[in-house]
Image: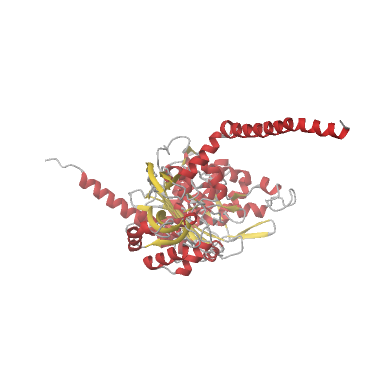
Amino acid sequence: MTRSAQQRQTGLRQQPLVLLLLVLLFCSAMVSRLVWMQLLEGSRFRELADENRIRLVPRSPIRGRLLDRKGRVLATSKLTYSLYLEPRLVSDDDWPDLRDRLARLLNLKPDLLDQRRQKGLDRDGYRTTLALDLKPEQVLRFREQALGLRGAQVDVDILRSYPNGTLAAHALGYTQPITENEFEILSEKGYKIRDRIGRTGVEAAYERHLRGKWGGQMLEVNAMGEVQRNLGDRPSQAGKDLVLTLDLDLQRVAEQALADKPGGAVVALEAATGAVLALASRPSFDPNFFSKLITTQKEYDALFSNPKKPLLSRAMNPYDPGSTWKPVTAMAGMESGKFPPNTKLHTKACITYGGHCFPDHNGAGFGHIGYVDALRFSSNTFFYQVGVGVGSKALKQAADQLGFQQKTGIEIGWEESVGLVGDEDWAARGRGWTDPGTSPWIPEDMASASIGQSVVQITPLQLARAYAVFANGGWLVTPHLAAGDIDWLSPEHRTKVAMRPSTLQTIREGLRKVVEAGTGAGLNGPGIPPAAGKTGTAEDSTGGPDHAWFGCYAPYPDGKIVVVAFAQNTPGGGSVHALPMAKKVLAEWENISKQTRITRSTDLPSFR
């Protein structure tokens, strides 16, 4: 046998071995693949198979209502119906017929339906919105013909509704669709891509309380997507209602008082507890804007880029407080021991500090006076002397005790500014805009700080909280918008201010004199309880026209309500512009209190 013949014979003998090895190799690969699919990834593939066989139809929960303290509705939910297309059930060939039938049945434009279909799937990934906010008769017509409209469906959406429009908008806040980034985090907590969440205000602060839980229907479908049977139904769980501390009547009056102002805020608090009775800000916005199913970019830009900043809550934004700050300077003077309650100082036309002569507002001074008359007449030169005499750290200490340059603790605190109370340490650090050590504290700063100008910036809410200390006998309370299960009188939420009784009494007497026979005398009148307060006219340190302020509490001496009125860039004085705003709120509060007393007296049992 030749050598080549031997090689061919050997190759033929090796072919079965090679084939066997190839068969074993393929079998091993198949077995390995089956092991991987069945054992290692079995649960995942079963889940995918179920997803193809079982469809989950989610049912959104109804969000809890927001109610005022008397149970009147401030925010609720409304149902709206939308027309959807399931693209995988409708081919390009089938679409023209379905489109035309829907257009005739629901009186819709065919070209609009085409445009909506071309936009592709919604964020939920399985359907396309064709029409929004269907009328009841449209929904009824669709349901009568639904069996012949394969691939189309009408579903209900639940939207937030604010029946009072702009009323209390900054306090209530608004809801918006969840973003994709938020969904990645919140999906583990039961949120769906179609969810709407509280974005600002109480809607955001009490999101967990209000939102409820999703329900759904589990349907078995065939390969064509046709429903075979209902495998189960779990109803959605509605969110809980939330009763707020706001009083709808007071809130309405507060906003009416702001109506003719370019900007401003009104805050009304229960002096003893910190419950917010009214929280108004102007300009405002309508939270129903954010409940629209479709909003154009132009509409968003008109709101968010508005130079008047309607989304900004003036109640929690800082401004120069002017003379409403003088009780803080008075507290610093008395508590330091350098200017005790019986102190009398000579006031005059102006006092020079550094290179500037700081004037009294009447251009002449008020003679030799003490704290009570200094507050009554709002003497600048009296408080210059007290403030410069005690220094910036003593003033800062008094301000800290009254809750300034810190969050008030209100539930919507992420929208709140801490403001500014400048002192020498702050100046040494660079004042927030320059290098440390380049802008030291100077006498002119101290004089300005004494009367609430330039280096002092506070919010109307902070001022209301501070005046509550004078009204309730020395307690620093926590402003809040919902009572809930929290004890707002506990040490965690209400602390005693370390202030001598004589200091508190002197400030109280001075604030009462302001209303009795001082710059706040305009507050007196029929239907107004005896009150104490302080006017303020503040230069706008940003360069705009003057601000007008008025802070007060009533009835005197142990106040039950604190009202702060602020008119932004409204020159003319606090007694002219801000005081009448507060007066309207006090009159309404007194009227409500009177009606409550009458109701309670008629409810009492009679004995014969």
Q: Position of residue 308 (x, y in %)?
A: 54, 64
Q: Is residue 580 visible?
A: no
Instruction: List the single residue furthest toward the right.
Output: 3
Choose top left, top right, bottom left or bottom right for residue 134.
Answer: bottom left
State the scheme by which the image is colored: secondary structure
Q: Which of the two residues, 247 or 21, is positioned nearer the viewer here?
A: 21
Q: Which of the two residues, 221 or 405, is positioned nearer the viewer here?
A: 221
Q: Describe residue 496's horizontal placement relative to residue 604 as left or right.
A: right
Q: Residue at x 40, y 54 (%)?
A: 155
Q: Image height check: is 542 above or below 60?
A: below
Marker count (numbered): 0
Q: Position of residue 193 (x, y in %)?
A: 50, 49
Q: Position of residue 477 (x, y in %)?
A: 46, 42
Q: Which of the two residues, 523 or 311, is positioned nearer the viewer here?
A: 311
Q: Image height check: is 327 above or below 117?
A: above
Q: Position of residue 340 (x, y in %)?
A: 54, 43
Quadrant (top left/top right/bottom left/bottom right) for the C terminus? top left
Choose top left, top right, bottom left or bottom right for residue 301.
Answer: bottom right
Choose top left, top right, bottom left or bottom right for residue 136.
Answer: bottom left
